[in-house]
Amino acid sequence: MNYNITQLKAEVERELTKNILPFWINKMPDTENGGFFGQIDANNKIIKDAPKGGILNSRILWTFSAAFRLTGNPQYLEMAERAKEYLLSKFIDKTYGGVYWQLDAQGNATDTKKQIYNLGFAIYGLSEYYRVSNDVQALEEAIKLFNLIELHSYDPLNNGYFEAFTREWGEIADMRLSAKDANEKKTMNTHLHILEPYTNLYRVWKSPDLKHKIQNLIRIFLDNILNKDNHHLGLFFDEEWNSKSDSFSYGHDIEAAWLIHEAAIEIDDKALLAEVRKHILPIVDAALEGYQADGSLAYEYDAETRHTDTERHWWVQAESIVGAYDAYELSKDAKYLDVVFRTWEYIKAYIIDKKHGEWIWSRMPDGNIHPTQDKAGFWKCPYHNGRMCMELMARI
């Protein structure tokens, strides 16, 4: 295959600026109630009365802040400002602190639980917005959320972070991030999306305490979450770090590989970075066990049924490109560059929606487009595919 990296950069920049971001600018702002609509369904219909999720709002904030940082397009900063204002005015709990999980279409809180994953994304968005705006309020709110996570979620006895709490920060029976998750107190996914925003916050706030927390999170991944036998990341754990599942997620494996690497680089801990780099390629190689002949990455492996779910999710394809490119930069091994180019060809052929804009949710194992999953919504945001484009634009 011809590895034309210059052309790849031009293509992903065009995809970001001509397809992904215009979709969100033109279709998602809710001019009647503020913020953004909560859903565009699988048939590309805006659901105006859909609930609004904190994760979607924070990911829009991060994406458009980062896009403005890379391109200087003032339209992107306007979108970021809209997301920031709505986050601070509607999603932040003024009484108990933290971020509401869900609002109704009018902006009233309907699910007030404190999911730590959700707080993490608010930090991610607010810290990125501060990078491009120097808006002190955004930085202050991000630091408040960091302090709340450390106060309420950090486990000083066994290390790590608990999943979720009630609005008042009490214990909550159902800690799951989504219906498909196991109801366990600690998960790989939440720890990954605490590490990611903490790393971004450190770019603008060089707190020694924050650096220590990032170092600790990296150690948790190396010592508790990473399975040293197969190089996959465990998914669910009890509070003492006993693994509660032998299944693994190819997409999360390859996403974690580059995010852990990024964190170790950012805090400039040379000994820890050297240790991390021993594990990056084995994690990526383990993730690529799910790589398919058509250039896509499968979703996950269920150890209980010994079944590989070969649904091709949009976000898994995006993260596989960033993870493989990071592995190529580290190793200079062309096999990773091959993954980058083959997956991009797959995305162009099967995931990008050339008619309606943005990307579809997924292709089913039989090749058909997923018939019911959102085009935009609670989990379908511009962050994975937008970030993939921006990572390649910045790295190439």
Image: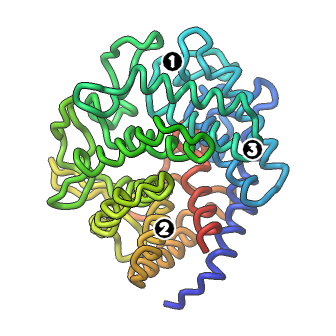
Task: Give SS at disc 1.
Answer: strand
Tell me the quadrant of the picture where the C terminus can be found.
bottom right
Q: Which one is earlier in the sequence, the residue at label 2 or at label 3?
A: 3
- Asked where in the image residue 116 lies, by quadrant, the reply is top left
Instruction: Write the residue at 34% across / 31% down.
Output: 161
Residues at circles 2 and 3 in contact by the CB criterion of under 8 Å: no
The residue that disc 1 covers is 111
Q: Residues within 10 Å of mark 2 (few under 14, many from 20)?
A: many
Q: CA distance from mark 2 to mark 3?
A: 27 Å
| Residue 382 visible in image | yes
Residue type of the residue flagged with mark 3: Lys
- Which of discs 2 and 3 lies nearer the camera? The answer is 2
Residue density around tag 3, few if under 14, some if 14–19, many if 20 or more, within 10 Å: some
Residue that carries the numbered disc 2 in the rendered image: 321
* Picture quadrant where residue 165 is located: top left
| Circle 1 residues within 10 Å: few <14, some 14–19, many ≥20 | some
Of residues 347 and 164, the one nearer the viewer is 164
Res. 363 in view? no
Q: Which residue is mark 3?
A: 27
Q: Does residue 346 sit above or below 166 in this rendering?
A: below
**Front-lying residue, 58 or 134:** 134
In-image side of 98 versus 296 (left or right)? right
Residue 181 image-quadrant placement: top left
Where residue 244 sits: x, y (%)? Answer: 17, 38
Q: Give x and y (percent) for residue 277.
A: 35, 65
